[in-house]
Amino acid sequence: MTSVLASSRRAWLPWAVGVLVLAAGFGLQTQLYTDQERVVTAVLMYVVLAQSWNLIGGYTGYASFGQVAFFGLGGYVTGVLMWQLRLPFWWALAASGLLAAGFGALIGLPLLRLKGHYFAIAALGVAEGTREVITNLTSVTGGGGGLTVPTFGADAPTAYLGNDGFYVFFLLLAAFAVLTVTLVARSRFGFGLRAINQDEDAAAAMGVPTTRVKVAAFSLSGLLAGLAGSGYAFQAVNIYPGPMFDVQITVLMVVMVVIGGSGTVLGPVLGAVGLQLLSEWLRANYTTYHTFILGTIIVIAVVLFPGGLVTYVRGGLRTGQWSLLTSIRRYRL
Amino acid sequence: MSQFLQATLYGVLQGGLFALIAVGFSLVWGVMNVINIAQGAFVVLGAYLGWGLATYAGIDPFLGMLVAAPVMFALGYALQRFLINLVVNAPVFITLLLTFGLDLMLTQAMNIAFTANYRAIPTSYASRGVEVLPDVFLPLGRFLTFGVGVGVTLLLAWVMSRTRTGLSISATGMDRGAARLMGINARHVYGLVFGLGAATAGMAGAMYGTVGTFSPADAAHLTLISFVIAVLGGLGNPYGALIGGLVLGLIEAWGGQYLPGSWENALAFGVFVVVLLLRPQGLVGRSYYAARLEV
Amino acid sequence: MSGAADTETPVLEVRGLGRRFGGLHAVADLSFSVPPGQVVGVIGPNGAGKSTFVNLVTGHLKPTSGQVLLEGQDITGEPPWKVARARVARTFQIVKPLRGMTVRENVAVGLLYGPDASRHSGAALRLADEVLERVGLVALGDVTPGELTVADARRLELAKALALRPKLLLLDEVMAGLRPGEIEPSLELIRSLSADGMTVLVIEHVMRAIVAVSDRVLVLHQGRLLTDGPPREVLADPRVIEAYLGHRYGRTHGADTDREQPRD
């Protein structure tokens, strides 16, 4: 499935678009109020997370329900290094990324031998287990009471980035995430992932070293989520195990990718932007009911557009079939 | 020594309740390949039903449970028949997302209706204890929940293997296509299974409220323990749920007694992942379930 | 003919190859060797162990006994991707196309990860057209496998195997379900591959094809090698007839290789 963006004739087009979007992102910043800026910062963070899941769940077809483990791990590595060792944020960021990627490689090896449901929930088990371990290593991580990243005064290893600073941080990280997925999608590695997704045995019969490739994808996805977690920890200043390893974060990642269009570069971006903005709007206008409405939207979206909005629109444009019942007819019992 | 025995007794008693909490989840997953993230929410809903009946109608929760069960069954049947059945043939994570959305809706609805305050369903007898061995007490309430939990689970096992309905459920679980060819209405059977899952969860919930406090916030944790028990015991197998419940109950009890902090939780998840990796069919489950579910 | 003394190292040699599943011996004690450039037909009734044999050679299954040697090198139990990179290619009996990808992209995977691994997807896509040309699919390069006819789907399966530029090609029932008019071009293709020096093992039920294209035929029965020889001899062998048609038929009838043998 070659999209307009991937056609080799206009190879420079996606890059031009990317640069434009990045410039727009910088420009947008000057137009936003503080709380709006924070909202967009959160959106950008979710773009990173969505692309992270997209790599392992979308391209490779291994739907992990434990992706938040990398986010939480990245956050805690940064938190602990900055709090206990007064390490500057940028070193902690690098460490978070490396450790998250390493963790992905380590647990990927046994876990990626499982298929389907088993892999999904084994990953969930790992995420929950990691949270429990962090909660119990009280002397290192502050345990259930959380930890506070030193951010003010002479005590702080790195000056707090502030709203503007974090906006730029997550904008660049989001650009990095999208760039990574774009490069993967067109590369030999991307072909390998898609082959594994479609038929792992056939891929192996064609020379794809499936274990290595899967683990690399998982590790790379961990890197992205870990970096996001690291930035988030610094931004939030006070972190606790529960919220940092909240399974809802994983589910949001999955929903964003699924609704936006998994296995594409653009899909997760659209999904993240759409869902996060929607969530913020609901939270602002329907505070009591916002989670309930979000749940309803997830249910409806999953039933009507399991292939994602991007696929629905493309399909409609190509075949003129816009019926909302197509997916239901296809997947119902 | 008496501490060990007390902890062991406690773990076993907990195990009985755990089994009932999880058996519906295990059945739904084993037969239909549907992972019901809202399982915990069903349990909590059952607790609220029990609480409501006790508070406003003075009905003892162990009786109120019998009223909650058909209500929960109807809810579960409707959800499966008219909603979840729509995505049953879609990839794995689609049903997961759907039940997650339902979980969000249900948990939030309960938060709104009942607030997030912790409640309990006190009974006059639940906190009484009998000293069965020197320094080892058998709390009556927990003993009752154990008894009912094990009893209903065994009843479910009997239904599955001895009644026509149960057999049609098993058949559909093993080979849906073949079952349909034999005249089994799979859509209806699926509804039944989810209904049974919701009903048993509701009953467990009503009892859960008698031995501790509850609030919508417990839903996530209850779903997680259902996961662990289902995997430990083997999917779709009520006896497995008993074994899984027992194992988890003992891990929690011994871990709570002898491990610092809350390491027993980390241990439980560790065991969970290891079992998945080494023996995905569970401690009691049969291999063909695990093989079939590699979708 | 078969077993002729060869001073060259055989491309494929199996020694005592066996695979057990619990108490069942799907393949037992297989020993034979294939010299370079030979086209070997492998026949046998259903359940004889033909596909298991292919899986054992290509690494999709690990043998429980015996060895597989490729040009003298022991490849027993190697994972499929390593075997593929050693230039052993196979087609799957039930074709396994990569559905979400175009025909060209399917072949490109083999070019990107196979023994002649190319680093760039662009170059691989261009080279893929050469492979597609060979099997006659170049016009359908942009199509997805779901839109292909049975015969074309088989060609894609073959193209995916050829992308590895194999020394040894195992074709698992590529003729099944083809119309008579579609069989002849497939035979032509096999002959041309053999003319280029490829060693081909053709696992088949369609006897006409076996006779037309094999230098030699191996017969598997209940996991063991029943006989090994020139096509016409083998098909006339009463033991072979008996294996396919049962004891009574074997006793009372001879073989008629001009008629296609019924398959069970």
Image (spheres, rainbow, N blue to C red):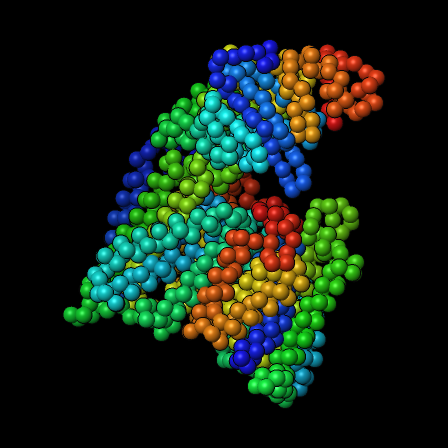
Q: Is residue B96 above or below residue C118?
A: below
Q: Residue furthest left?
A: A154
Q: Is residue B241 visible?
A: yes
Q: Position of residue B174 (x, y in %)?
A: 69, 50
Write down the quadrant of residue B27 in the picture.
bottom right
Write down the quadrant of residue A186 in the picture.
top left
Write down the quadrant of residue A330 in the picture.
top right
Q: Is residue B113 above or below residue A62?
A: below
Q: Is residue A38 above or below residue B59?
A: above
The structure residue drawn at horizontal position 23% and vertical position 60%, both measured from the top left corner, is: A89
The structure residue drawn at horizontal position 62% and vertical position 29%, both measured from the top left corner, is: C29
Q: Which sits in the foreground, C172 or B178?
A: C172
The structure residue drawn at horizontal position 52% and vertical position 65%, both measured from the top left corner, is: B224
Q: Is residue A221 left or right of residue C252?
A: left
Q: Is residue C51 visible?
A: no
Q: Position of residue C136 (x, y in %)?
A: 52, 19
Q: Is residue A200 above or below residue B200?
A: above
Q: Position of residue B258 (x, y in %)?
A: 47, 74
Q: Which sits in the foreground, C187 or A84?
A: A84
